[in-house]
């Protein structure tokens, strides 16, 4: 018996339409469940991230009283006054110096230690543990430890100076050495995380590449620059981005070790924001500084992704 082609087409069309309705219902259910699961996270994100951000931007356009309440609309005059202030320029210079030094030393030393720890040497596991111990140290404990280390009378560096018959350095009271002390402390704190991430990346490089290089007689330095670095470049890019952002936001060690001193030698932007808000009660000024710092971090990150990511081998 011959089938009617028209009826077959109708049946096929009805099946297709029913299938579309089913897919639509599934998509609607997916959106419903997605809203349920994402709702709490979006609410908390809006409450603790986006609302404070827009509130800070709003306050930066006004003058405020000591309670933080807006009084007079100032527009962008707060920004104009701030970027021409010598104190702010000093804090910006100090911050840039700190960020560059911390990033370069953290990545350089972390990469060196990770490369050494990847070698098959006796008792290398002990050194791996020692290198990564700083990940379990809190900011407060690190500050106490380094305050003792930098003590000009009984600290570790003072003992070395006395043993060498040298005058001990006043690390935390001399403007020439206070920034160096903070940089050393921060690098020591960051090394554990950087070391572990880079070590994992190096150990994931296929060993066959090194074996082929050994057969060709390539030197260890050639293997490091031509094999290791290109293969771990995505991880290196990630670590550098995280390190730079964290350096811009450094607060705890500054507050516990130097409190921005001496003579504003370590008064970085984040600590300046804190002091202007909670010491001076100038919330408009601190909000303006916070917005400028946010813009600086965003621009630096954008430049990284725009130019440095091109050199990353995925």
Image (spheres, grey):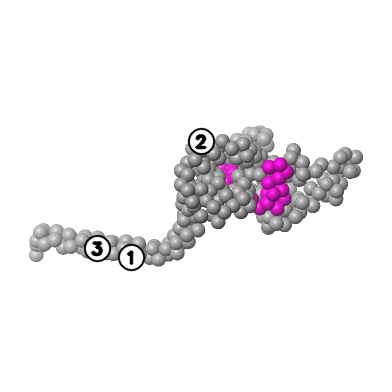
Q: Quadrant of the N terminus?
A: bottom left
Left or right side of 182 for 28: left
**Total marks placed:** 3
Gap between marks 2 and 1 measured at Cα: 42 Å
Residue 62 placed where, x, y %?
A: 48, 48
Q: Nearer the viewer, mark 3 or mark 2?
A: 2
Q: Earlier in the sequence, mark 3 or mark 2?
A: 3
Q: What residue is shown with label 1? A: 29
Looking at the image, which residue is at 56% across and 36% down? Answer: 84
Q: Is residue 216 magenta?
A: no
The circle on residue 191 is: none
Q: Residues within 10 Å of mark 3 (few under 14, many from 20)?
A: few
Q: Earlier in the sequence, mark 3 or mark 1?
A: 3
| Secondary structure beneath label 2 | helix
The circle on residue 21 is: 3
Left or right side of 307 for 264: right
**CB within 8 Å, label 2 to label 1:** no
């Amino acid at each position: 018996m011959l089938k009617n082609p028209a009826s077959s087409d109708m049946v096929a069309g009805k099946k297709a339409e029913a299938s579309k309705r089913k897919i639509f219902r599934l998509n609607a259910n997916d959106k419903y469940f997605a809203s349920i699961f994402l709702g709490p996270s979006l609410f908390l994100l809006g409450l603790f991230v986006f609302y404070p951000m827009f509130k800070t931007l709003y306050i930066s356009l006004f003058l405020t009283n000591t309670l933080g309440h807006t009084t007079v609309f100032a527009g962008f005059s707060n920004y104009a006054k701030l970027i021409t202030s010598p104190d702010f320029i000093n804090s910006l210079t100090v911050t840039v110096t700190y960020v560059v030094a911390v990033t370069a030393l953290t990545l350089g030393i972390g990469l060196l230690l990770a490369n050494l720890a990847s070698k098959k040497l006796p008792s290398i596991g002990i050194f791996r543990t020692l290198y990564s111990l700083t990940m379990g140290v809190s900011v407060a404990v690190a500050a106490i430890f380094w305050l003792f280390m930098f003590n000009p009378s009984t600290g570790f560096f003072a003992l070395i100076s006395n043993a060498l018959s040298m005058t001990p350095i006043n690390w935390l009271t001399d403007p020439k050495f206070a920034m160096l002390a903070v940089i050393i402390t921060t690098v020591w704190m960051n090394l554990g995380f950087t070391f572990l991430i880079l070590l994992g990346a190096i150990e994931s490089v296929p060993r066959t590449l090194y074996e082929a290089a050994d057969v060709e007689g390539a030197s260890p330095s050639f293997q490091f620059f031509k094999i290791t670095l290109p293969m771990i470049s995505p991880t290196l890019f990630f670590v550098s981005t995280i390190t730079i952002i964290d350096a811009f936001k450094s607060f705890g060690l500054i507050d516990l070790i130097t409190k921005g001193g001496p003579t504003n030698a370590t008064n970085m932007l984040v600590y300046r924001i804190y002091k202007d808000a909670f010491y001076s009660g100038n919330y408009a000024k601190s909000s303006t500084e916070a917005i400028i710092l946010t813009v600086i971090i965003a621009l630096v990150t954008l430049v990284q992704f725009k130019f440095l990511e091109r050199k990353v081998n995925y």
